[in-house]
Image: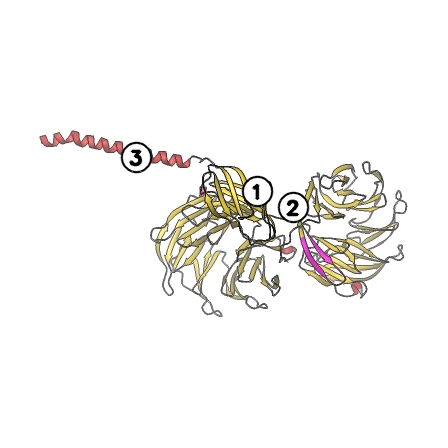
Amino acid sequence: MGKLQTNRPILKKRFLLLCLIGYLLTTLVLLCWIKRLQPQPQPKINEISVDKKSATLSIRGDGLSEGLDAVITISPEHEQAIISTKFTWGYVSDIKIHDNIAWVANISKGLISYDLGNPARPQILGSIELPGKAWSVTISGHFAMVSDPQYGLYIVDILQPDQPKLVSKLQLPGQTYEMVVTEDKAIIAAGTSGVHIVDISNKRVPAIISSLNVDDNISSVSIYGQTGYISGVNKKNNNQGTVYSIDISTPSVPKLLNKAELPTAVWDTQIINERLFCGTNHGLYAFNLNEGGTTRSGQEMIPDIIARRLLHRDNELFIADRHNHIHQYSINHKTIQYKKTFVTNGACRNMATNGHIAVIANATQGLSVIDLRLPGETKDPILTLGYGARRLSKIIAKDDTLLIQNGVKLHIVKKNHQNTYERVNTLSFPKKITHIITDDNRAYLTVKTRGIYSVDFSHDDSQPTLILPLQQAIRCMTIKDERLYLCQVNDDILTIDISDKSKPTILPAEGFPANARSMIIHNNLAYVATFSNGLDIYTVQKGKAPTLLTRLEHLVPMDLFGTITDMQRKGDFIFFSGRQGLLSVDVSSALKAKIADSINTTHQCRSIQIIGNYAYVQHIYGIMSGTTLIDIANPKKMKQLCELNSCRNFTVSKNKIFSFVDGELTIDKIPIVLKKQQTSTNEVIFQLPTELDSRKYDLHLSSGNQLRSYKHGLTYDKMNGWGQTSP
C-alpha cells in the first residue's frame, strides 16, 4: 500500500510531462500549418531577356525558385490586325466611306461621320439624329441615303461632314432595308413589300416611281445592267432562300423575270465577274449571269460558311459572318481561294474598305479599324459547319477523324489527302444527342428519350442504327470489354452486353450505386462518383456481379468543391473537376483511396482532358469560357501553369487543340512548357524550342498561385531565331 502511494507523485509528474509534450507538439504542428497557410512571398521579376545564339529565355529577379515555370502559346494574330477601336453608344448597323470619311448608320443615334485621316485614331466630325432608325447608308455624290426599316428613306446632305443636314424623307410601304443607287434612282429592298424604285433626281422631293411585290421577305438588292436581283427568305418557310431577277429597263413598270431558290435564307448579294454571289447561313452560292442567271440552279462556291455580309474589292472577296469573323478570299473568273481571317472587336454587322484599311460596324461595340496588310488569322485547315453549329456539345478526336456533336446532328469530319479536314457525313437523329463515346471505329450515342444508337464511322456513308430503345435520361456512359455502362438519372447503372452488335442484351441489375454522377472502368476496377460527391470502387469481371471494395463518403464538401462535373484517370490517380477546381485522389490501393491534392481555379470547372503530364480543365465564368493548364506530373502537388482562352467545346489530340467558334473549326498547337536549364534565386534560364512557325508568341509565367502573361512577348523567325517585344 505504501509503495503504491509513493509511486503516485511519480505517475502524476509523468502524466503532466506527457501532457506538456503533447501540448508543445500540437502547438508546433499548428504553427507549421499556420505558416503554410500564410501567403508566401511572391517572386519579383525584374528582367526578361532572350539569347538568340543559345535560344534561351532568362528570367531575372528576386526570390526566384525551382517553382517558376514558363509556358509559350501562339499569339492570336487578329489582335495585331486591329489598329483601333471606337465605341459609340447605340447599335452600329452599316458603314460607308467617302473622301476618307466614314459615314456610320447608328440605329438609335442617326448618321455619324468620322475622320479617317489617322486610322489609328478615328475622330468624330459630326452627326445628325434622324426621326427613326438608321439601318443602312448609301453615298451618292454629296448626299447620304439612309434607310429606316419602319419609316422609309432619309436623304442627308453631307457636303459639310461636320454639319450633316436632313434634306428630305419619304415614307415607303413595308420595310426599308438595303438599297442600290444608280444614276438618279434608288432601288430599295422592301421586306414583305418586295422592291421599290424611287426617283431621287430631286433630293429635296424624292418620289416613288413604282413597286413590285413578291410573295417573300426581301432584304438585299443588286443591279447588273438593266436587271435587278432581289433576294431574301421565303415568307412561308424561313429555312428557304429566294432570288428574283427583275427587268428595270422601264422603271415605271418593273417586270418579274424568274425566281430561284436556295436551301437557306439569302442575307446579302454581290455581283463579281458577271456572277451573282449570294451569302447564306450555310454557304456561298453563285449564279452565272451570262449562262442563264437565276434560271439555273445556284452553284455552291464555299460550302457551309456563314456568309451574312459580302464585300468585293478588286480581286478580293470579304465575307463577314455577322459574329466577329471576316474571311478574305482571292477571287477570279473561275476560282475562290481562302487567304486569311480577321477577328473583330464584336459582332460584324457590315464593313467598308479604304485602301489597306477596313472599318467594321461592330453593332453594340462601335467600330473596329483593321489593317488588311497585317497577317490576320491563317489557321489552316479551316472547316465551317454553318450557322446551326455555333454551339456544339462535344468534339471527339479519333486518329484522323473528328466526331462533332451538335444538337440532333453528328458531323463526321476526316483529314483528306491535302492534309485538310472535310465533312464526309452528317447524321440526323430524332432527338438531341446527350452522350457519345467511341470504341475502335464505332461510336455509341444516347439520344434523349429514344435510346442508344451505333455508328460505324470508318465508312463515310455509314448510317446510325438504333440498338436499344430507352426512355430513361442518361447522365454518363462508358464502355469496357464489349459492355456499355449507363449512369441513369435517379436510377441504377444500366449494363448492356454489346458483344453481339445486332442483338444487345440488358444484363440483370448489378450492385452499383443508384444515381451515379460519373464512372470510369480501368483494369477490372470501376470508379464511380456518387451523387453525394463520394467515390465507390468496385471489382468488375465478365460474368460476375461487381464487388464493392471501398467507399469514400463525401469525398469533398459540396459547398467548397461543388458537384462533380467530370472525372479522369491517369496512372494511380483519379482527377475530379467541380465548381471550384481540380481534385486528385490516390487510388494506388483500391482499399485505401485517399485525397492527394486540390487546386482552386476560381471558376466553374466543366470538364477535364489529360494529355501526358498536363490537365486541360475547361471552365466557365458567366457567358465566357476558358481553359486552365495544370501540371499533374506530381498529382500530390499539382500546379497551375496558365490560362488559355478557348470556346466552350474543344478537344486535344496529337499536340493540337481542335475547337469550334461560331460554327468554324480552328486548330491550334498545344501550349509549350519550357524546360529549365539553370535555376537560382536570382535567375532561371529556360530552353526555347527551335522548330516553330514564324510568328508572335505569348509568354506565361507561373510561380505558386501567381500567374503572369505577356501578350506578344516573344517572336520567332525561322531565319533569325527568337526575339523579344517589350512586355
Residue at 31% x, 35% y: name it: 26
- Can residue 201 be seen in the rendering of this structure? yes
For residue 314, the mark is none
Which span is picked out in magenta? 323-340
Q: Position of residue 381 (x, y in %)?
A: 62, 58
For residue 80, the mark is 2
Q: What kind of element bears circle 3? A: helix
Rate crowding at label 3 as few (under 14), some (14 to 19) or many (20 or more) other CA atoms within 10 Å: few
Residue beneath label 3, please? 25
- The earlier-in-sequence mark between 2 and 1 is 2
Rate crowding at label 2 as few (under 14), some (14 to 19) or many (20 or more) other CA atoms within 10 Å: some
- In magenta stretch: residue 326: yes
Amino acid residing under circle 2: Gln
Are the residues tagged 1 and 3 within 8 Å (C-beta)? no
Quadrant containing the C terminus is: top right
Amino acid residing under circle 3: Leu
- In magenta stretch: residue 156: no
Pick the front one: 15 or 80: 80
Residue beneath label 1, please? 710
Q: What kind of element bears circle 2? A: helix
Residue at 34% x, 36% y: name it: 29
Q: What kind of element bears circle 1? A: strand
Pick the front one: 666 or 500: 666
